[in-house]
Image (spheres, grey):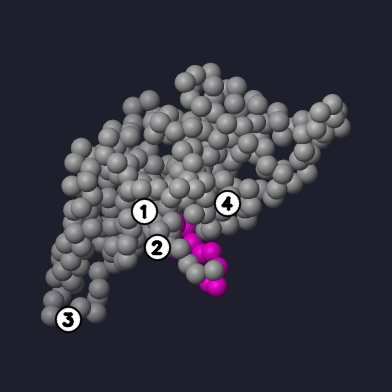
Amino acid sequence: MEQAAMEPAAMEQVVTVGLDGSPESLAAAHWAADEAERRELALRLTHAWILLAPPTPDSPAADDQNYWAKHIVHDAHAELARDHPKLTIIEDLVADEAETALLDAAAHSRMLVLGSRGLDRVASFFLGDIGLHTIARAERPVVLMRAGQRAREHPGRVVVGLSLHGPQDNLLEFAYVTAFTRDVPLHAVHGRTPDRTHTGTGGDGVARDTEERARQELDEVLRPWREKFPRVRVVDEVRLESPARAVVQAAADSDLLMVGRRKHPPALGPRLGPVVQAAVHHASCPVAVVPHE
């Protein structure tokens, strides 16, 4: 298998899923188990509860206090083990606030997977403060999964949205490894609105010039990754429309949409750009948000 870049020593060889007892988090756990198995990693089931009592010998009170937390993790473990008998599954009960626990788990995992609730029939995500803050601050990729979104029996393709502004190695590495482990094509899409201030050409000429420049830039960005992952078939596309609209439309009928999130200095606080916002609220498939410099 093509090797990914060297990972930080602190990263564990696990995929972590956050469990809260909801159908959405259980769907996320099934997706995470499939992904861990494909990548030959372990799966960690994390449930955080600030009132979790420390385990002590012969302590019925602590057992009662921790009953539901243990029940959530044990039931998920049993269900996943039936479907993935060879997968290493780790139970992780954390006595902390959920956001703190998830951010810490993400920092030591290959990726963090979270469940998300759909509000209506127009494939939209509802994310509480915990989910949004986790996406905006996590050091590793965060995947969002809704109930009912299970891995397809016959995988089709995965999509990565590229801005072409600044380095995106983390996003491209994640995208190529994902396509490789699934043995599916990678659809790389870039959206760009034609520059109407460009002089010397009419409307059609502006569009052609914009598309040509974008295609050249996209090819330059993808070239080293094509060489690094020669067995991954890549379909690249430039769409002359807003980047947010381009990635959401390109992800229709795909297995996974991957978008990048630029890390911001602590003084600026965590922020999600318009492309990430559009992806997590409107994409009809699971979404991976990958932080990069």
Q: Tell which tag, 3 or 4, sits nearer the viewer.
A: 4
Q: Residues within 10 Å of mark 4 (few under 14, many from 20)?
A: many
In the rendered structure, the answer to whether residue 102 lies left or right of residue 250 reads right
Q: Are marks 2 and 1 in contact (CB under 8 Å)?
A: yes
Mark 3 or 1 closer to N-term? 1
Q: Are marks 3 and 4 in contact (CB under 8 Å)?
A: no
**247 vs 288, nearest the viewer:** 288
Identified by mark 3, the residue type is Thr
Question: Residue at label 4?
Answer: 103
Q: Residues within 10 Å of mark 1 (few under 14, many from 20)?
A: some
Q: Work out whether 33 lies above or below 216.
A: above
Helix, strand or loop at disc 4?
helix
Rounded to the nearest angstrom, the CA distance separating label 3 from label 4 is: 48 Å
| Residue drawn at the location 72% of the way across and 44% of the way down | 95
Helix, strand or loop at disc 1?
helix
Q: Which residues are magenta?
A: 267-278
Question: Residue at label 1?
Answer: 170
Q: Are marks 2 and 4 in contact (CB under 8 Å)?
A: no
| Residue drawn at the location 40% of the way across and 56% of the way down | 260
Q: Quadrant of the N terminus?
A: top left
In the rendered structure, the answer to whether residue 248 lies left or right of residue 54 reads left
Question: Residue at label 3?
Answer: 199
Q: Position of residue 213 (x, y in %)?
A: 18, 66
Identified by mark 4, the residue type is Leu
Q: Residues within 10 Å of mark 3 (few under 14, many from 20)?
A: few
Rounded to the nearest angstrom, the CA distance separating label 4 from label 1 is: 18 Å
Identified by mark 1, the residue type is Asn
Rounded to the nearest angstrom, the CA distance separating label 2 from label 1 is: 8 Å
Q: Quadrant of the C terminus?
A: bottom left
Residue 293: give its label: 2
In the rendered structure, the answer to whether residue 237 lies left or right of residue 123 reads left
